[in-house]
Amino acid sequence: MSTPFAICPDPAPLPAHAACTLRLLDRRSDLLVREVAALRAACAAVKRRRPFQILGAVVLPAELRLVIRAPDHDLQARLSAIKAGFMRALPPEEKRRSILLRRKDVGVWMRGAVIRPLADGRALREEIEACWRAPVRAGLAADPSQWPFSSYRRDASARAA
């Protein structure tokens, strides 16, 4: 007896698209914008070891938001590596501030990360635009083009080309 359909191997896994948020323990801190070079270096190092693409991003004083595409679904490992790389690059005095001592914590990051899988192109576009608007909503800039730590300028120049 033959089967009514062909049996195909499982297709290759699709790339994972997700919106990710990493927050500092001290929500009043401006550490991420003060040490943005270290944060960029940590992201670049992780991208070399475990490739992924940043589709949208914004660095706020105490929060990093990323919209990423990865070839697999192991986003948590990539985010953990970014957090660890950033911590290693910080000067020793930044690693243990008073709020951390009060909470008896050893790092600057909140534990874990918020990861929201994106199901379609519309959700992807909305999350990228949310990254662009975040500095305006936080009162850090009057217009997304004024905030230097965002993918807005990169994306706006790509649209103009």
Image: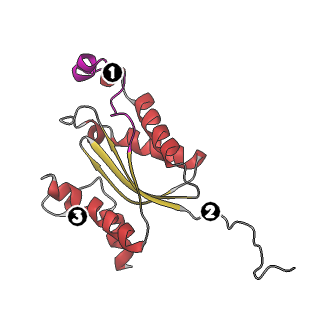
**Mark 2 vs mark 3: in front:** 2
- Give the quarter of the image for residue 157: bottom left
**Mark 1 vs mark 3: in front:** 1
Q: Nearer the viewer, residue 35 or 70?
A: 70
Examine the rendered structure and indicate whether residue 122 appears above or below residue 108. below
Report whether 106 appears left or right of 140.
right
* SS category of the residue bearing label 3: helix
Q: What residue would you read off at disc 2?
A: 13
Q: Is 101 covered by the magenta stretch? A: yes
Q: What residue would you read off at disc 3?
A: 145
Which corner quadrant holds the C terminus?
bottom left
**Residue at x 47%, y 38% (from the top left corner):** 80
* SS category of the residue bearing label 2: loop
- Which residue type does callout 2 highlight? Pro
Q: Nearer the viewer, residue 107 or 114?
A: 114
Question: Is mark 1 in CB contact (under 8 Å) with mark 3?
Answer: no
Q: Position of residue 128 (x, y in %)?
A: 34, 64
- Give the quarter of the image for residue 152: bottom left
The disc placed on residue 150 is none
**Residue at x 28%, y 44% (from the top left corner):** 63
- Which residue type does callout 1 highlight? Asp
**Residue at x 36%, y 73% (from the top left corner):** 122
- Which residue type does callout 3 highlight? Ser
Magenta part of the protein: which range?
Answer: 96-113
Determine crowd level at label 3: few under 14, some 14-19, many 20+ residues with C-alpha closer than 10 A: some
